[in-house]
Image (spheres, grey):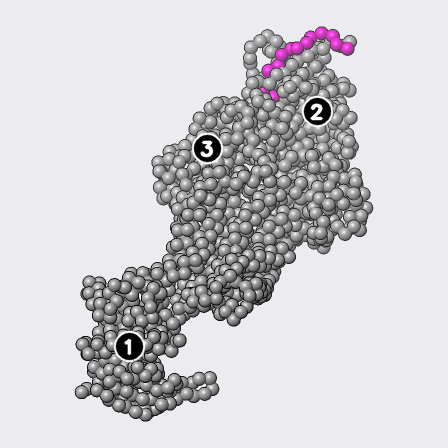
Amino acid sequence: MNLKLNHVAFLLFLMVVLSLTWASMSFATTTDDEVRARLILDLIDDLWRADSSESTVTMRVVTANYRRTVTMQNWTLGKNYSLVRIVSPQKEKGTATLKSGNVIYTYLPKTDRTIRLTSGMMMGSWMGSHFTNDDLVKESRMADDYIPRLGFEGDREGRSILEFILEPKPEAPVVWGRVVITVLAESYLPLVSLYYDEDLSLVRTVTFSDFVEMGGRTLPARLRVVPTEEPDEYTELIYEDIRFGVLVPESFFSLQQLRRQ
Amino acid sequence: MGFMRIVFIAWRNLLRNRRRTLITAFSVAFGVLLSVTFTASGDYTYTNMINSSATMGFGHVTIAAKGYNDTPTLTRRLVAAEELRRQVLSNHEVENAYVRIAGQAMFAAGVKSIGGQVIGVHPLQERPEHNLFIRSIIQGILPADSESTGALIGAKMAEKLNLRLGKKLIYTLTDRKGDLVSGMSRVSGIFQTGEDMVDSSVVLLPINRLRRLLGYDAGDASLISVLIWDQRGADLVRQKLIGSLQQTGYEILTWAETQADLAGLIAIDRAGNYLMQFLVGLLIAAGILNTLLMSVMERTREFGMMMALGMSPVQVVIMVMVESLMIGLLGLFLGAVITTPWYIYMAGTGIDFSSQIGQDYSTSGVLVDPVMKFRLFKESVIGILAGVFILTLLAGIFPAIKAGRVPPLASIRGI
Amino acid sequence: MENLIQLRNVTKIYQQGKVQVHAVQDLTLGLALGEFSALCGPSGSGKTTVLNLIGALDEPSQGTILLEGNDLALLNRTQLSRLRRDRIGFVFQAYNLVPVLTAYENAEFVLALQGVPAKERYDRTMTILDEVGLAGLANRRPDELSGGQQQRVAIARAICPEPAVVLADEPTANVDTTTADGLLGLMEKLNDEKRITFLFSTHDQRVMDRAHRLIRLTDGQLTGDEVRR
Amino acid sequence: MIGAMGFAGFIMIFYAALMEGLLHTTEQNATVMESGQFQVHAPEYRDDPDLYTMITQEVEVLNRLQANGYQAAPRLFGVGLAAAHASSVGIMLRGIDPDRERLVTEIHRHLLAGKWLNGDDPEGVVVGRRLAKALGLVVGDELVVVSQAGDGSMANELYRVRGVLKSINESIDRSGVFFLDEVFRKLMVLPDGVHEIAIRSPDDTYSLADHTQQIQNLVPDLEVKNWRELQPVVARVIDMSRYSLLLMLVITYSAVGILTLNGMLMGVFERIHEFGVVKALGVPPWQIFSLIAIESFLQVVFASIIALAAGIPLSLYFETHPLDLTGLASSSASIAGIALDPLWYCRVSVKAVVDPIVVLMVVAMLSIIYPATKAALLKPLAAIHHR
């Protein structure tokens, strides 16, 4: 039987996490609200991810059993390609994850092996963080799977905000019952996103902070995920550096490239 | 001297010491009872196990894509399975056949997830008697049709994933090309077989939705589960199907191959059963031998005299053998008399061990009811009859030869 | 008269433990058709041995035995068995009836062995039973018959197949005087009417008195051969 | 007569020893193959087998158990992924101490190919049968194991398949990968603690429950379970087999009883004539009765001696030279997911030897009551003429 496979490191959390939230929901449906919501979300998406990007990110994970800090480099091309390579700690240096369409590979330099992700590993923790591998894979489908609407528009805690509510489509294969995203009204920068299960209980919270200018844009440099069940634990992502529009060819996202140190 | 006369004298000899004959015959009868008890509980239990396991998805005979039995992945497809099924159904030994998709999948709800087995079925074709999971439904129903979003899941999985009727279940599997794909269903029913392993891993989904998700063509599947009227015919049906089916690229296996552990268990249990029966048979044969030997020694003079009168040793041997056989036949008859009520009771009511044993009772992952019941196959009956016959024959040989060796002289010198 | 039975220099030695017993020594004897003779002598004189040898139940250590001109030594077991069945009748001291068979069935036993058809068998057996005076007791078992009656059944059994010779080993040993007389009378009558040859072994004076020829044996040797009638 | 009874007794002893052996083997398979008779875990481990829910101060716990006569083997578990030949499968990593494990279970004897773990070969791992098949592994092949270590890092290491196990149980067959405990600790970054301690009791003198209690007293803060609690389904299968085998045994004993009765009846009745003569000589009825009783008793004693002389050596032979039924089970056989050893051993227990003899004696003595009484009360004349 399948085991609950934690811990296979993959990819490109960045892309996932971000696009989970700001995926460009590209196809058309009805209401004015929805149209507006999509427009705004598209803007946000553009803000984060141009046609291509290159970034350096530090991940800090705090759990009841360990704390760890990992620094990695990340490249993206469109929605289909991304590559993450660990820079430190030394022990894991060179470990890389490639996402190409629907297929995900992990390269393990220590054993010089490349492993392809299978369905049994989907719900495992990614890199010992609070993300699952499934989080990484699902992103491209977010656009197809949710219907956004504007839930609130106005002032909250002294800031003018917009709150979008994303409801899954009836037959969408997604685990969340609802996702609520709050953005600043004037800049569309994200503040917080809340993930609910089907019974509409809060399951995890992602907060965005440290708005700085990077790669020519203003972005939240810090992102923190807190599981509702373990409020003392979290995973934090800190952008050290990001550049957009870098020239990375499609061939960069290949198995050969994955193995290259 | 005609054979009938020898039989006649033998019969009279048996009547001479009725008590002894009767007691000996009774020990044979007891042997019959014992043999029936051993064999019939085996016949019942094995059939029950095999049929139960057959209704867990693979049938008595399985037609699957080549290599599927060794590595049951969804990348192995049985092309045009629906057409194959039609051909299979034209065999009169076949009770029914089901086209199914079966493979590994990851099931998730909320933040919880669990690995398991997905089985794609045609809800409208499935019949409870051929599908353990449908028989075991404790809540709700099987998905309405092969396009429905429903899912039938095990009670243990429902518990682990915190699912109720109507709740969303996400499943992720590897499609025909090996890519990861996900689908969504809503729980339409919950089953409970009593075995945790099954109840926490199996999910039944409508086959057409799975096909689309996996990129299968309309007639494709993983396997055809063939249910036959009598599980003993599995090998025969397999041979017949191999001979009659067109197309290639598939393998046909019997339950003994798809459920090798169960087949092994049954083979070993059966061997043990035979050994035990053999030992009891030896005992009974010893009893018959003892009786006959005693009666032969008593009659030494008589045999001598008969041979003095011109009866040949061979005729004497035959006479004693016939006596032995008659004891055997009488024993069989008495055996039938005492065994029939016992068998009728055991075939109908049986002995319920459930007070000694808890509820979630299973063997080799196949549920078995905790009632010891009987069932006797025709060949088992013939086996028992032949066994008793051979036994009495064997038991008779030594005393008979001893009788035949008596020198005619002994008679004249006697008393 | 040609000899029905011919014993030529017959010797029979038994090994009894470490001792060799000379049961019969160099016996030469002829027996003619229709004789009514008795072998007599004390216990251990070799009477029974001689009957056994003549009845093809035993083989001599030396010498030749001819029955109707056939050398018994040249016959195999099956042939001997057949010879006994067809040509020799036995009457034993202890009757030796088959206990599970009726008087009739005992009497027809040898006929049945010979494979005589049922109808003929019945006729012949019933005739003989009638002659021995047992017609009314045909359906009784041996244990329902008196000693004399049992011996009559035995005689009937012996003569039914019309043998060349009836060998009778101490036929009167187990019965009272009256019965013995009756039995001897019966056998005499059968000898007389049917020309059946009888050879007795006996130390019973009544038998010796009525025998037509007395052959005396002492320690396995012929010590007297006296023809009375 | 003596011969027949002796034979019956002999068969019964062999039969009983086979039965005992069967039950014992099944029980052994349930415990000795893998699980051990008892297991100790941290209290919540069994509900939620978390990598961090461990038994701490394991050295102290192990020593305490051993000081009280229990053999104890520490075990470590983790989940991960094994990859070989371009495919990968989810696995259960099992870290064990082969020296201690050997004293508790006999898994080291159930290898299909290759060798069991050895301290001299830290890179060698032993894998389950189906896992080997799924990954196409043979002895000597390389295997990459990937997991999340205790410190959250990516654990990955290259190993070499040292051995492939025979069928043990569903979980091990499909996903078990065995490591030396220190190798496991290094890979998984778990410097101390264990997840499980498997225990074997020194003897069978105490009941399972007593042992469980005794172990519980030794480790009051930990959860102690015996194999019946750990594997309730197997326990039930064994119970069920026990009941049905018992039924079979009763029926078999009855058959033997009838045979003995038969023999004794015949034996006495045949000698009624003789008893009549003795009685005519003036022996009183009670003496005749005792004579028969004593004679019969002596007969049974002789028969028992024959039975023991033949039955025990044969059973002992099959205790060390089992009937090998491997050929019958093409690949494997299992009960409730626990592999069945297709070797059928006899087990010469006191029960298996004494029960048949007792049955034989009781039946024999009961069965002479009627004929002996009859002989004792017979009128001398009738007896002499009896048949």
Q: Quadrant of the C terminus of chain A?
A: top right
**Near-viewer residue (B141 or D370):** D370
**Near-viewer residue (B357 or C192):** C192
Q: CA distance from mark 1 to mark 3?
A: 89 Å
Task: Give the residue at x 69% y 11%.
Answer: A162
**Near-viewer residue (D353 or D67):** D353
- Residue B264 on the magenta span: no
Can residue B241 be seen by looking at this rendering?
yes
- Residue A155 on the magenta span: yes
Q: What residue would you read off at disc 2?
A: A243
Q: Position of residue B87 (x, y in %)?
A: 36, 36
Q: Are marks 2 and 1 in contact (CB under 8 Å)?
A: no
* For residue C101, side relative to residue B40 (left or right): left
Q: What residue would you read off at disc 3?
A: B129
Q: What residue would you read off at disc 1?
A: C181
* For residue B119, side relative to residue D149 (left or right): left
Q: CA distance from mark 3 to mark 2?
A: 64 Å
Q: Quadrant of the N terminus of chain A?
A: top right
* For residue B72, side relative to residue C92 (left or right): right
Give the amino acid type for the residue marked by disc 3 in the picture: Glu
Compared with residue A214, is residue B261 higher up or lower down, i.e. above or below?
A: below
In this picture, which residue range is highlighted in magenta?
Answer: A137-157
Task: Give the residue at x 80% y 49%.
Answer: D63
Q: Position of residue C70 (x, y in %)?
A: 24, 83
Would you call the spot at circle 2 few (<14 residues within 10 Å), some (14-19), or many (20 or more)? some
Chain assignment, label 3: B
What secondary structure is found at the residue carrying circle 2? strand
Give the amino acid type for the residue marked by disc 2 in the picture: Arg
- Judged by depth in the image, the label closer to the viewer, 3 or 2, is 3
Compared with residue B207, is residue A26 higher up or lower down, i.e. above or below?
A: above
How many tags in the picture?
Answer: 3
